[in-house]
Amino acid sequence: MSEMFFYNHTKMDMTDWEDLYNNLFITAKEILNLENNNLSLAITWVDKPEALKLNQEYRHQEYVPDVISFPTEMDEELVKEMGEHELGDLFICYDVALEKADKYHHNIYEEMAFLFVHGFLHLLGYDHDLSLEDEKEMFTIQDKILKAYNINYEVIYDDEDYL
């Protein structure tokens, strides 16, 4: 049985997002043919100071990110022994999600759904920074998962978001 663990380091009630993320997780597993895999991951909602600290400490970056993914490296033997594959941890900053939703004319539901799917794909090893081919593969899967929820999310890249 797959499961997600939710942690809230903010002062906001994030329980509504848990339902969305559980549903997106099920859909993503179906689309990626991972239904029979016993997967687990942790999602932590953080505020801006904590998101910045994580980004500085682990990625040596000086901006507040909307989502950070930390995959867990597990070989097949360990997965067999444990009976599950721990994918890793996602840290999502709701305040940055609100800002980006406003800036790029998405609603917060679309933005939060995108952040989960995007981070989840990173935990699975997808990466859009390696090549245009890898970016196309990741974004195609991302779009397919989001479209299952009638979300047509346009990724807009602005260098200012990473300063």
Image (spheres, rainbow, N blue to C red):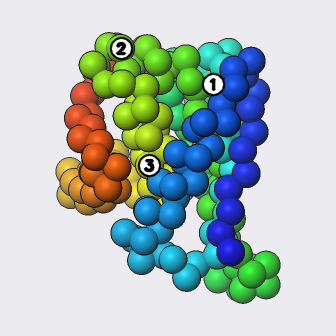
Query: Could you say where residue 13 lies in the image, as x and y percent from the top left?
Result: 69, 26
Looking at the rendered structure, which numbered label has been put on residue 117? 3
Q: For the point 25% across and 28% down, which residue is it?
A: 156
Question: What is the three-letter code of the residue carrying label 2?
Answer: Asp
- Above or below: residue 81 compared with residue 42: below
Query: Could you say where residue 80 lies in the image, as x and y percent from the top left?
Result: 72, 86
On screen, residue 97 versus residue 7, left or right, reads: left
Mark 1: few, some, or many residues within 10 Å (few <14, many ≥20)?
many
Mark 2–mark 1 Cα distance, whole angstroms, equals 19 Å
Q: For the point 52% across and 45% down, which residue is it?
A: 20
Q: From the image, which quarter does the C terminus lie in?
A: top left
Residue named by callout 1: 51
Q: Let me know if residue 122 appears in the view.
A: no
Q: From the image, which quarter does the N terminus lie in?
A: bottom right
Query: Could you say where residue 16 lies in the image, as x and y percent from the top left?
Result: 60, 36
Looking at the rendered structure, which numbered label has been put on residue 102? 2
Mark 1 element type? helix
Asked if the residue under mark 1 is in contact with the one under mark 2, i.e. CB atoms within 8 Å, the reply is: no
Q: For the point 42% across and 77% down, which residue is it?
A: 33
